[in-house]
Image (cartoon, helix red, strand yellow):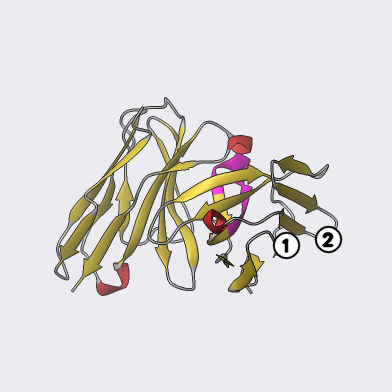
Amino acid sequence: NAGVTQTPKFQVLKTGQSMTLQCAQDMNHEYMSWYRQDPGMGLRLIHYSVGAGITDQGEVPNGYNVSRSTTEDFPLRLLSAAPSQTSVYFCASGSGASYGYTFGSGTRLTVV
Amino acid sequence: RKEVEQDPGPFNVPEGATVAFNCTYSNSASQSFFWYRQDCRKEPKLLMSVYSSGNEDGRFTAQLNRASQYISLLIRDSKLSDSATYLCVTSTGGGNKLTFGTGTQLKVEL
């Protein structure tokens, strides 16, 4: 099993550009989330989903959109990239509160 | 104040040593608790869940004190391969929302 797959692994954007970070899981997990990791800040929740068609905001949702049309996929859209969005982005999926989450290998995004 | 606080370290210990990490959390509504391990420039990986009764997985022992809002991780007989950053994590919202500490760095040396 591939687990959680994120693409791309690296991306450089210019300020104002838009892009979509892809995330797919093959474990039939209901729960999926997006986090960003910045030095000294820990991982912070951007958006999450408890199932197909259901999404909600996390701690730092501004500037990002998500949708969940299938159980497997949970893309993250940057609407108009800003330098403050330079970060490492992790997608995660899980099957319930007590079981923890499985993370993808991350996307390193630089906005110039 | 961060919702989950950890000593950033680094903790430099010799191989074979016992090392303990502590973590405090401020949200009394936290429902589940975890330790994750993160290697440099890699994704976090679940090390173990943490229960009030305490739980052990090989050389690793985790403990939760809900009254004090305190979580601990004990690593016995440290190996070089244990060198990593250890993340203390709580969850709320039915487990959908994870809150991460900034991590404690461990370096195990020969």
Side of B24 where A99 appears, left or right: left
**Residue situated in front as seen by the camera: B5 or A76:** B5
Q: Residue B105 is drawn in which quadrant?
A: bottom right
Q: Residue furthest front?
A: B110
Q: Which residue is mark 2?
A: B68
Q: Residue A81 is drawn in which quadrant?
A: bottom left
Residue type for callout 1: Ala
Residue A31 x/y as whole percent: 47, 35
**Residue situated in front as seen by the camera: B37 or A71:** B37
> At 22% from the left edge and 57% from the top edge, which residue is drawn?
A10
**Residue situated in front as seen by the camera: B94 or A97:** A97
Q: Earlier in the sequence, mark 2 or mark 1?
A: 1
Height in image: B83 above or below A15? above
Q: Sort mark 2 into few (<14), some (14-19) or many (20+) by Cα contacts within 10 Å.
A: few
Residue A2 x/y as whole percent: 33, 32
Chain ID of residue with mark 2: B
Q: Indicate the secondary structure of the residue bearing disc 2.
A: loop
Numbered circle sitting on residue B20: 1
Side of A76 where A46 appears, left or right: right
Q: Main secondary structure of the magenta part?
A: strand
Tell me where the magenta segment starts and ends, as one range. B87-97
Residue A1 x/y as whole percent: 36, 27
Can I make out residue B20 in this image? yes
Residue type for callout 2: Ser
Q: Indicate the secondary structure of the residue bearing disc 1.
A: strand
Quadrant where the C terminus of chain B sits is: bottom right
| Mark 2 vs 1: CB contact within 8 A | no
- Tell whether position A74 is magenta: no
The residues bearing labels 2 and 1 have C-alpha atoms spaced at a distance of 17 Å
Side of B1 where A50 appears, left or right: left
Height in image: B11 above or below A88? below
Height in image: B82 above or below B52? below
